[in-house]
Amino acid sequence: MSLPTKAKQIAAVAALLEKAADADPPLSLEDLAEVIVDGYHDIITPAKPALHPHAEMAFKHPTLSSVHHVAWSDDYRAWVVSGAARYGFFVPLASDFWKYAEPSTAKSGAPGNNVAGWLRGDLVSRGQRARKFEVIATGDKCVLLQDVLTEEVECDSNDNMKLYYKKERGNLL
């Protein structure tokens, strides 16, 4: 959500004050304050419908410092990454978070460009093959793994992938 420019905000507040000044009978201070607050909320409230998150979607958000991308989603949540993210984070699809997100055309940090060379479909194991995973999505510095037995998903950094995981060949079952 981007706020209107300062000039537009001033013009909108001035219009509200002018409307209040022309009211007949004159407004009380409480009524005037209510008009100003309601009008300002109308200015800053997003008029667009919330974005529907989907894989590969780039977006900006007022709580995030850079453009982020949806790298993966299922029926309930989306895995969100940026170019600098070492893990990414999950956001429920039904969350109010998406009301304030705005689409972006930025390509930097897009999923699928892992600098360590991890690719979707890679098979890995951890703990002497006690846990087996498939890479189902990648960010620049992180991967999303799905346990091949339980189908649970978890994210990990490229640094941890190098230290704790072994790349496997063939079937892990």
Image (tube, grey):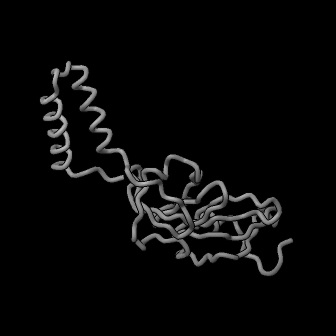
For this view, does 41 lie left or right of residue 154? left
The percent coordinates of residue 80 (x first, y second) are 53, 60
- Looking at the image, the residue that sits furthest to the right is 173
Q: How many labels does the image show?
A: 0
Q: Residue at x 21, y 25 (%)?
A: 32
* For residue 20, above or below residue 43: above
For this view, does 150 lie left or right of residue 158? right
Q: In the image shown, does 16 or 167 lie closer to the viewer? A: 16
- Choose top left, top right, bottom left or bottom right for residue 24: top left
Please identify the quadrant where the C terminus is shown: bottom right
- Looking at the image, the residue that sits furthest to the bottom is 170
The percent coordinates of residue 3 (x first, y second) are 29, 50
* For residue 134, above or below residue 151: below
The percent coordinates of residue 83 (x first, y second) are 46, 67
Q: Residue at x 79, y 66 (%)?
A: 148
Q: In the image shown, does 56 or 168 lie closer to the viewer? A: 56
Q: In the image shown, does 130 or 77 lie closer to the viewer? A: 77
Q: Which residue is drawn at 37% across and 51% down?
A: 47
- Looking at the image, the residue that sits furthest to the front is 24
For this view, does 155 lie left or right of residue 115? right
Q: Which residue is drawn at 58% across and 60% down?
A: 79
- Choose top left, top right, bottom left or bottom right for residue 142: bottom right
* For residue 113, above or below residue 1: below
The percent coordinates of residue 48 (x first, y second) are 40, 54
For this view, does 170 lie left or right of residue 76? right
